[in-house]
Image: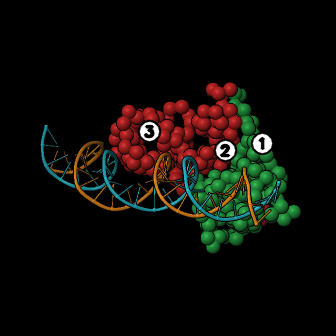
Chain colours: A red, B green, C cyan, D orange
DNA sequence: ATATTAAACGCAACACAATTGCATTTAGTT
DNA sequence: AACTAAATGCAATTGTGTTGCGTTTAATAT
């Protein structure tokens, strides 16, 4: 399915900003910060981009992750994941050199045993180190 | 060792703000946000508190963690951990109800196998769910 | 093709977290 | 009690993210 139809299928209008944002997010298999995305445009309104990302998230098209520096990042969801039940059980990798964040879709973690009284909704595993390209 | 001597041992002056901040951090076995700490004082200068936390971190007394909402939090280090080689291999738990963050010092995770080319420096595992007290 | 309208956009203003510079105060020492 | 480097408190600034509102535009109906 093309980008335009995919956006429409999610109940959103296929506007230029949305098309470009989605194309950037789909390229590179990584999680993009607001700033990184903004740099991918020749011209965008900051606020519009914030809203586009929020729309994408609410539509279950992308998931939001906070990186090792506290920077908010967005990555396209591989499986259609409804906002409420985001699995997020895959691992994220944050490079200490280039600061890019990658989604390690094939790396999964073992179930964790919590102390009594604590119930788990989800896990977020963030590995930091040196990435592929920087090594 | 008492709080005053511990701070001095780390090469810092034992000032009122530092003493109070450390006492708060040591109580409750959890990770404190700036706002939570500030509320524990009858009166502090925000900026001073920022600097105190930064000093503690650089002295290896506390470690910084970003919670599920992107909020920066600080927790006392159990083992003396030099700033550079923070092990951080224990798990953090973030409650969806009260938003408190706990250090699960006894919960550890299995080693993770990364794709070729990626080298790991550290891991950060953040579980979110409902805590002890809220359940 | 054109008109319609709800959604999306762009701008201004605002809220909050965090940092920097600088003058003043204070803890630990002589 | 005096000294000095460290710590504090205030003002100003930066960065990130949000809200309100009037204007524009994508998708639909005519």
The image shows residue A69, relative to residue B115, as above or below, that is below
Please determine if labels 1 and 2 lie on a single subunit. Answer: no
Give the x, y percent position of residue A19.
39, 37
Instruction: Identify the residue shown where x is 68% and y is 57%.
Output: B52
Viewer-nearest residue: A9 or A72: A72
Q: Are marks 1 and 2 in contact (CB under 8 Å)?
A: no
Secondary structure type for disc 1: helix
Number of residues whose C-alpha sits closer than 10 Å to that of mark 2, classed few (under 14), some (14–19) or many (20 or more): many
Residue beneath disc 1: B85
Question: For the residues carrying marks 3 and 1, which lies nearer the camera in this image?
Answer: 1
Q: Could you give the CA–CA distance between mark 3 and mark 1, rounded to whole angstroms?
A: 34 Å
Instruction: Identify the residue shown where x is 52% and y is 41%.
Output: A33
Number of residues whose C-alpha sits closer than 10 Å to that of mark 3, classed few (under 14), some (14–19) or many (20 or more): some
Please determine if labels 2 and 3 lie on a single subunit. Answer: yes
Give the x, y percent position of residue B117.
69, 27
Chain of residue at mark 1: B
Residue beneath disc 3: A38
Looking at the figure, which quarter contains the N terminus of chain A?
A: top left
Residue beneath disc 2: A126
Chain of residue at mark 3: A
Q: Is residue B113 visible?
A: yes
Number of residues whose C-alpha sits closer than 10 Å to that of mark 1, classed few (under 14), some (14–19) or many (20 or more): few
Position of A44 with respect to C2 (left or right) is right
Please determine if labels 3 and 1 lie on a single subunit. Answer: no
Instruction: Identify the residue shown where x is 54% and y is 31%.
Output: A28
Question: For the residues carrying marks 1 and 2, which lies nearer the camera in this image?
Answer: 1
Residue furthest right in the image: B1
Q: Quadrant of residue B131?
A: bottom right
Q: Could you give the CA–CA distance between mark 2 and mark 3, rounded to whole angstroms?
A: 24 Å
Chain of residue at mark 2: A
The image shows residue B72, relative to residue A104, as above or below, that is below
Secondary structure type for disc 2: strand
């Amino acid at each position: 399915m093309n980008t335009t139809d995919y956006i429409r299928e999610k109940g959103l209008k296929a506007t230029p900003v949305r098309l470009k944002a989605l194309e950037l997010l789909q390229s590179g298999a990584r999680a993009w910060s607001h700033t990184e995305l903004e740099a991918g445009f020749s011209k965008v309104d900051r606020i519009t981009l914030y809203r586009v990302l929020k729309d994408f998230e609410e539509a279950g098209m992308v998931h939001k992750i906070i990186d090792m520096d506290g920077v908010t990042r967005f990555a396209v969801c591989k499986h259609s994941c409804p906002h409420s039940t985001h699995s997020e059980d895959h691992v994220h990798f944050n490079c200490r050199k280039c600061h890019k964040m990658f989604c390690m879709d094939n790396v999964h973690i073992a179930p964790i045993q919590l102390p009594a009284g604590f119930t788990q909704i989800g896990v977020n595993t963030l590995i930091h180190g040196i990435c592929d390209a920087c090594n």
